[in-house]
Image (cartoon, grey):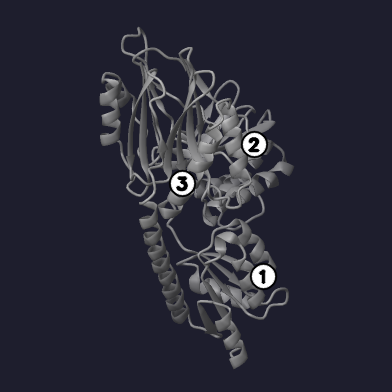
Amino acid sequence: MKQLLFQRQFSLSYENLRLIRRFFSDKAQALHLNQELVQNIKLVCSEYCANLLEHQEQTASQVTISYGKSDGHYFLSILDNGSTWQHQTEQLQSAELPVQLMESGMGLGLIQATFPVFNYKSSRNHNIITFRIPVLQHRKQIVIVDDSQSQLTLLAHFLEQDYQLALFSKASEALQWLEKNHCDLVLTDLHMPDINGFDFRQRVAAIQHHRLLPFIFLSADTVSETLYAAAQSGIDDFLAKPISKAHLSSVLSRVLERHHHLLTAFEETLQQQLNTQSYHSNLTTISNQVQLLVNQEPCISGDFIMQQKLSDGSQLLLLGDQMGHGIAAKANGAISFGYVMGLLQNPETTPKQVCRALNQYFFHATEKSNLMCLVLLHIRSNNKLTVYNAGMPCPLFFPSQHQPFSKHQIVDTSMGLLGLFDNLEPAHWQTPISSGDSLHCFSDGLAETPFCESELDELYRLSAQERHQYLWQSAKQNPEDDCTLVTVIFN
């Protein structure tokens, strides 16, 4: 993987399969995973690990599950320390779902039907299977709450082709789900046994990331007192039962479109205010040891860059990328920029302390979806470079052309996103540096596709300055994302 977003090791047992499934449910919001994808990942992990337990000659004791991005696609990898699963590739490729549903024998067929593109590799100490996650058609997420099972079935039949649905017969269960998941609209009955629709509306609005969530009541109670109370509750519409599919679809489209326009207008206003603020960078000439080249687009973005000299004469250089798109990423990027600046004001700090402090900051943040990717460079006075990568694309290191037998390197050591887990052991990559060496770091808006070996060979023949310009001008940029390229040239 060229951009590792998370990696987690589990002891392999039937009891821990539930733990693995719960892990993905808990991290879905932070990783911006929609519910359909979460369900597919949980299914594949559970079924594949169950097959390891059943079919490996020497059963693995541990599995490491990784999620990341490479070559413009997202990937799920499962590494195990058991014996090779003989003919596993052929079995998976030929697996089919049975015509009749059954309680067993469906595992490989489910995996093949869910993530059909995969690669399996074995080595002396481990095996690893990597699934390419299919691109799912984006559909709005709607929560439907009604204590009548027949009504839930009817509404699901009306909407399942156009929307991603989460169905609940109890409002209390819907509240628990909404605490951890994204939603675009709620459609709820009024009179329910555990929590009535009015109280449910207030409790959903109290959830920070759902304060402006579109809300529609659907009820057979149309007396004037009920309609007045509904209007006072600040909902978007009130629909009387029974309702037709055409009318329901029309109302949902109108409410969602209206909220989209309101959000766009708010973002444009906030964008104007952000554009009056300073550029998210803090770069100064603090040492003649390095030369920095920076390109960023747009200037006000969720990406930020900063530099700090430490008391021992070494220096830190940090490139951060706030996860997400649009104005929210830009605003959160400004907040993170200020927090990291505060951390770096202490000249006695270390890169590991910065990583751990940021990990705790994001782990305990109220809004779990505002995580940050970063790459932190520690440039020491004894000509050593250490790279700490937390969820960013792999940097590229090019040694000086004057060094014999030297070759470019893809710095693929990563610890995954900060803030996903309470404890963090920062992983790092280290190399001695010489005059003429260069390191190129970039956010994922710059390069969606990894550089092939021949392209890297061509880049190595260029000067560091030419290499920087080539990367900025020729990389496959994502127009929807912020783009930043930082080149460090060692003098």
Whichever of labels 3 and 1 marks the residue nearer the N terminus, that label is 1
The percent coordinates of residue 67 (x first, y second) are 53, 40
Amino acid type for the residue under numbered disc 3? Ala
The residue at the point 43 percent across, 58 percent down is 138
Residue 348 horizontal side relative to residue 446, left or right: right
The answer to whether residue 325 is seen in the rendering is yes
Amino acid type for the residue under numbered disc 1? Ala
Q: Label 2, label 1: how many angstroms apart (C-alpha)?
A: 38 Å
Compared with 173, 403 (above or below) is: above
The residue at the point 62 percent across, 65 percent down is 206
Amino acid type for the residue under numbered disc 2? Leu
The percent coordinates of residue 400 (x first, y second) are 34, 14
Which numbered mark, 3 or 2, is in the foreground of this view?
3
Where residue 27 is drawn, which disc sits there?
none
Along the line of sight, the residue nearer the viewer: 254 or 451? 254
User: Label 1: how many residues lie within 10 Å, few (<14), some (14-19) or many (20+)?
Assistant: many
- Residue beneath disc 3: 334
Circle 2 — which element? Answer: helix
Q: Label 3, label 2: how many angstroms apart (C-alpha)?
A: 46 Å
Whichever of labels 2 and 1 marks the residue nearer the N terminus, that label is 2
Compared with 232, 163 (above or below) is: above
User: Label 2: how many residues lie within 10 Å, few (<14), some (14-19) or many (20+)?
Assistant: many
- Residue beneath disc 2: 52
- Residue beneath disc 1: 171
Circle 3 — which element? Answer: helix
